[in-house]
Amino acid sequence: MSTTNHISTKWLGNMSFESNNPSGHSLRIDIAKEDGGDGSGFRPKALMLSSLAGCSGLDVAALIKKMKLEVDEFQIETIANLTDEHPKFYDKVVIEYHFHGANLAEKKLQRAVDLSIEKYCGVMEMFRQFAELEIKTVFHKK
C-alpha cells in the first residue's frame, strides 16, 4: 500500500512561508533579499539538494551502522547546475560522498553508496527524471 504525505505551507508575508513536515517539524522558506525576499529561510531549489543528500546520507549511515564500519566523518557535497531559462531547474548534479577515517573499508563503503544510489534513495530516483547525475566517492585516510 502506498503512503501519502500531507504538507501544509503557510504564507508569512512578503516572500516568506512556513512549511511543516510529517515528522512534526517546520521550516521557513524564503528567497534572497536581492530577489525581493528577506533571506530568512531556505530557498526551495536548494532544499531539493538537501533532500537528495539527506535521503542518500540516511541510507549510507544505516549501512555503515549495519556493516559496523569505522568512519570518523562522513559528508555529502552536492553541486548542481541551474538552467538559465525559466522555469529554472537543475539539469546536472554532482554528488560527492566524502569519508574520513584511519580504517576505512573502501569497498564496503562504496557498496553502501552504490546501494543508496541504485536501490534505496527515492529522491535520487526523482532527480534522475530531470537531471544528469555524476557520483563521486572520496576517501580521506587519516
Image (cartoon, helix red, strand yellow):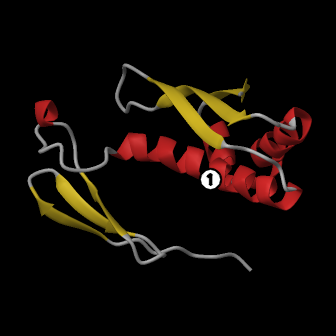
Q: How many marks?
A: 1
The residue depicted at 89 percent of the width and 41 percent of the height is 108
Please state the horizontal and vertical placement of residue 38, each as a whole percent of the image: 12, 45
Give the quadrant of residue 24: bottom left
Quarter containing the N terminus: bottom right
Farthest residue in the right direction?
A: 107
Find disc 1 in the rendering and name its residue: 55
Please state the horizontal and vertical placement of residue 140, each as a whole percent of the image: 70, 26
Q: Crowdedness of circle 1 by 10 Å Cα count: few (<14), some, many (20+)?
A: some
Q: Secondary structure at mark 1?
A: helix
Going by the numbered disc 1, the residue's amino acid type is Cys
Q: Nearer the viewer, residue 47 or 97?
A: 97
Give the quadrant of residue 102: top right
Q: Is residue 126 left or right of residue 14?
A: right
Please state the horizontal and vertical placement of residue 9, each as a whole percent of the image: 30, 67
Q: Nearer the viewer, residue 140 or 22?
A: 140
